[in-house]
Image: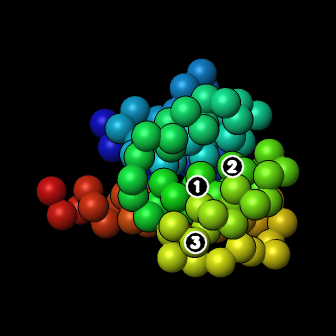
Amino acid sequence: MTPPSDFAAFVASLRSNAPPAGAPAELAALWWAKRDQWDRAHEIVQELETIASSRVHAYLHRVEGDLDNANYWYRRAGGTATNASLEDEWERLTKELLTQASADSALR
């Protein structure tokens, strides 16, 4: 099964017991983060070495309140810290990663 390709479907999946089947790890981490499962989300991205996982990792450390660590991960992702609210950042990251996942699955 492929991950939900639209934001509304992804948000609706938050009522489930687990992230959508086939969701990339970075999206699964954002799913767990939205369900207030920071440790589980962090565990997922901890071992990944992608730009997307570094962006999610930065977001997670913002949620945690560890801005120095968040800034480190933003730099690793090639960016800088954002002033957006945590909710806005979660939404933006989720939408971007859903678009990327949809494009990736279209290539298969």
- Badge 2 amino acid: Leu
Instruction: Relative to 14, say whether 65 is above or below.
Output: below
Per the image, the residue denoted by label 1 is 56
Per the image, the residue denoted by label 3 is 75
Q: Circle 3 — which element?
A: helix
Q: Is residue 76 visible?
A: yes
| Residue 3 position within the rendered picture, expressed as x and y whole percent measured from the top left | 40, 45
Q: Residues within 10 Å of mark 2 (few under 14, many from 20)?
A: many
In the picture as drawn, the residue positioned furthest to the left comes out as 108
| Residue 84 position within the rendered picture, expressed as x and y whole percent measured from the top left | 80, 72
Q: What is the distance, in whole Å, between disc 2 and disc 3 at their CAs?
A: 14 Å
Q: Which mark is residue 60?
A: 2
- Labels in figure, total: 3
Q: Is label 1 in contact with label 3 (beta carbons under 8 Å)? A: no
| Residue 88 position within the rendered picture, expressed as x and y whole percent measured from the top left | 76, 66
Residue at 55 percent across and 33 percent down: it is: 43
- Badge 1 amino acid: Val
Q: What is the distance, in whole Å, between disc 1 and disc 3 at their CAs?
A: 12 Å
Residue at 56 percent across and 41 percent down: it is: 29
Q: Is label 2 in contact with label 1 (beta carbons under 8 Å)? A: yes
Q: Circle 1 — which element?
A: helix
Q: Which quadrant: the C terminus? A: bottom left
Q: Circle 2 — which element?
A: helix
User: Which one is earlier in the sequence, the residue at label 2 or at label 3?
Assistant: 2
Instruction: Relative to 100, say whether 5 is above or below.
Output: above
User: Which one is earlier in the sequence, the residue at label 1 or at label 3?
Assistant: 1
Residue at 70 percent across and 35 percent down: it is: 38
